[in-house]
Image: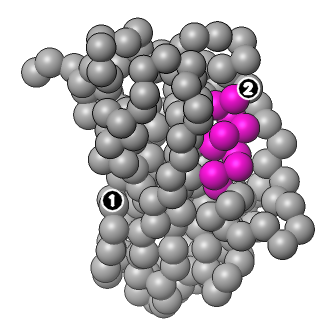
Amino acid sequence: MDSFTPPSARPPILLASASPRRAQLLSAAGIRFEVQPAEVDETPRDDETPAAYVVRLALDKAGAVARTRPGRLVLGADTTVVVAGCMLGKAADAIEARRMLAELSGRAHDVLTGVALVGPSDPVTAVSASTVWFQELTSKDIERYLATDEWRDKAGAYALQSWISRFVTRLEGSYTNVVGLPVALVCDLLMRYPEG
């Protein structure tokens, strides 16, 4: 199968992320890319909405890489989980992960991913939103999941494509968004991104 190539056979895009899940999703979709992670301050700002937060971080990541690689097209992304209006980022430790999973138990939550393309033309951004429903998680369920270490480095302390998927009763929106990158949205932005 041929790889997806952005218009005019551009060089591979630069992925401003060290996430293996994002790299796997791009590879599976046939998108040519190179990995160049970016380190940015991920502290939320006062009164910043979850959507504004993920877009800002996606732009910051892409912009940081673009400054070192002028003329190249850079993809930045950031994902957060939102439950009852509160953002759940990556758990710092098992104690925080346990608290997050307890908050998600038996209810719906939203997963938002901000996507940014930064390159020769003006930056473009978008947000993908999905809703996930969890059934009740017992204390034993949570402890068993924590023992897998699959919660590490994941927004909301879980990976949809892992053991915990047995507790997901419903999903609305993009599946790949919940995994970490809304692939259909990325492809659409790449096709519409103006030539530099």
Is residue 187 depicted above or below 144 in this figure? above
Q: Quadrant of the N terminus?
A: top left
The x, y position of residue 78, in whole percent, is 60, 48
Q: In the rendered picture of this protein, how many numbered marks are placed on residues?
A: 2
Q: What stretch is highlighted in magenta?
A: 54-63
Q: Tell me the element at label 1.
A: helix
Q: Residue at horizontal 41%, vertical 81%?
A: 133
Q: Which of 189 and 45 is in front in this view?
A: 189
Picture quarter containing residue 10? Answer: top left
Q: Residue at horizontal 33%, vertical 59%?
A: 175
Is residue 98 depicted above or below 53 in this figure? below
Which numbered tag is attached to residue 64?
Answer: 2
Q: Tell me the element at label 2.
A: helix
Q: In this view, does 184 lie to the left or right of 68?
A: left
The x, y position of residue 11, in whole percent, is 40, 9
Q: Nearer the viewer, mark 2 or mark 1?
A: 2
Which numbered tag is attached to residue 175?
Answer: 1
The x, y position of residue 185, in whole percent, is 36, 48
Q: Is residue 55 left or right of residue 174?
A: right
Residue 144 visible here: no
Q: Nearer the viewer, residue 33 or 107?
A: 33
The x, y position of residue 120, in whole percent, is 56, 19
Residue 91 visible here: yes
User: Which three-letter amino acid code belongs to the residue tagged 2?
Assistant: Ala
Is residue 97 depicted above or below 41 in this figure? below
Q: Which of disc 1 and disc 2 is earlier in sequence?
A: 2
Q: How crowded is mark 1: few (under 14 residues within 10 Å), some or many (20 or more)?
A: some
Q: Residue at horizontal 53%, vertical 41%?
A: 124
Q: Which of 149 and 81 is in front in this view?
A: 81
